[in-house]
Amino acid sequence: MTNRRQLLQASIATGVTTLVPHDSLAAAKAVTGTSPWDLAAEIVARIKPPVFPKRDFPITAFGAKSGGDCTKAIAAAIEACNKAGGGRVVVPDGDWLTGAIHLKSNVNLHLMKGAVVRFSTDPKAYLPLVFTRWEGVELMNYSPLIYAFEQENIAVTGDGMFDGQADDTHWWPWKGLKQWGWREGAPKQEAARNKLFAMGQAGTPVSERLFGEGSYLRPNFFEPNRCKNVMIDGVTIHNTPFWEIHPVLCTNVTVSNLKIDSAGPNTDGCDPECCKDVLIENCFFNTGDDCIAIKSGRNNDGRRVNVPSENIVIRNCHMKNGHGGVAIGSEISGGVRNVFAENCHMDSPDLGSALRLKNNAERGGLLEHFYFRRIVIGQVAHAVLTVDFNYEEGDKGPYTPVVRDVQLETVVSGKSQYGIDAQGFANAPIYDISLRDCDFQNVAEGNIVKNVRGLTFQNVTINGKPAKTPA
């Protein structure tokens, strides 16, 4: 018994879940006395926010003036704070304009109440190019608005606001859609996006994937890349160019108490990519894409890096508009495992699906061990749970998408088109979806279930009637 319990705990801690293939971690509870939620508590217990020395470096001491361009002053304050051994770079009450901000180890960028940091809408303010990732593919591109590379103990905190100043005139038109301000003959991202994806497929060295000016690939908002001990807490984030919180290849990440309000194209709220040990809690999301989307690289480039996202806990969050409340994918070729979401509230006619897993035969990632409980849904447009292998390339690819061990417990919904929309492939079915103690009301069209093995209902009602496990 002891050896089996240790095996399961190690599978969560290290991600070696192939040792228990096709076996729900919860199913082993009868043998070991351990449930997935016990192990989720262990994950949370080892996630520690970074701690900083009690030293303040006000940006005004480095020449920043409210209303003026503070890029150099903020950079100087960060440099001084880092060289002194760490502390807080303090942005006081006022209106502050800046270009790219690059964090360094042991620095907490802290916005005081009343502070508004507005980011320049001039793309040149995000040069020179930096090593980043765009829709799951590594490249050299515009700097994210707030960026860190290979740093430790970094944070963005406070009660102030970051305004990306993206709108139908700045950044968003690059998407190439008229609804976001694009007009015939204006520049757009399509050609560069296709070029980048082709480079990723071909294995072109990242140092040769040079984009930036003339390419129109919008920068992420906050991207700590290859960092350890990361926190973003308390701030409000408004109208960003692209993905908002995007930790890449990071370990020990805390995302907490954020208010994210950005309804533009691809403005995902929080996208941990190839990250380990992540806590997302007490956040509000109103986005133009997925509220939370867990990722691990796109197609061949994701397989080249080959690092999964794992050990992620989401709790006490509120999702309003977006494509999905909690999503997995679609850039997921490195795989994802051990995701827990609880005590979340989702409610909007403009929220697509509450829980959404996306994979296909070109991604081919291994997605396993997803646990959702105490999720309250007012209404969503599509489904409570969507598991979709037909996303984008669909079955047009040589790789086998895998999704297994998805559990919903005490999930309630007031209105949706479908309860479950789960569609695998005949040669790649979805394995082991279980629902227990769930109640879905005002479901317009029942469920869609195709190529699923191991779908079970226990005390589940749809429109007031018991849901039956398919034969």
Image (spheres, rainbow, N blue to C red):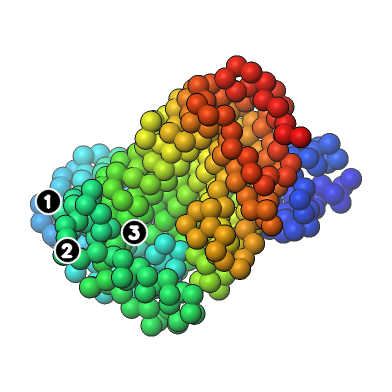
Which quarter shows the N terminus? top right
Determine whether, in the image, residue 67 is placed left or right of residue 378: left
The residue tagged 3 is 220
Query: Between marks 3 and 1, how big is the CA–CA gap?
Result: 25 Å
Say which residue appears at 59% left-offset and 37% top-offset: 448
Label located before the other in sequence (3 or 1):
1
The residue tagged 1 is 66
Label located before the other in sequence (3 or 2):
2
Query: Between marks 2 and 1, how big is the CA–CA gap?
Result: 34 Å
* Mark 2 or mark 1, whichever is nearer to me: 2
Residue, far top: 464
* Mark 3 or mark 1, whichever is nearer to me: 3
Residue 22 x/y as whole percent: 76, 50
Q: Amino acid at mark 3?
A: Asn
Determine whether, in the image, residue 109 is placed left or right of residue 421: left
The residue tagged 2 is 186
Say which residue appears at 72% left-offset and 34% top-offset: 470
Residue 210 x/y as whole percent: 33, 78
**SS of the residue at dot 2?**
loop
Callout 1 environment at 10 Å: few (<14), some (14 to 19), or many (20+)? some
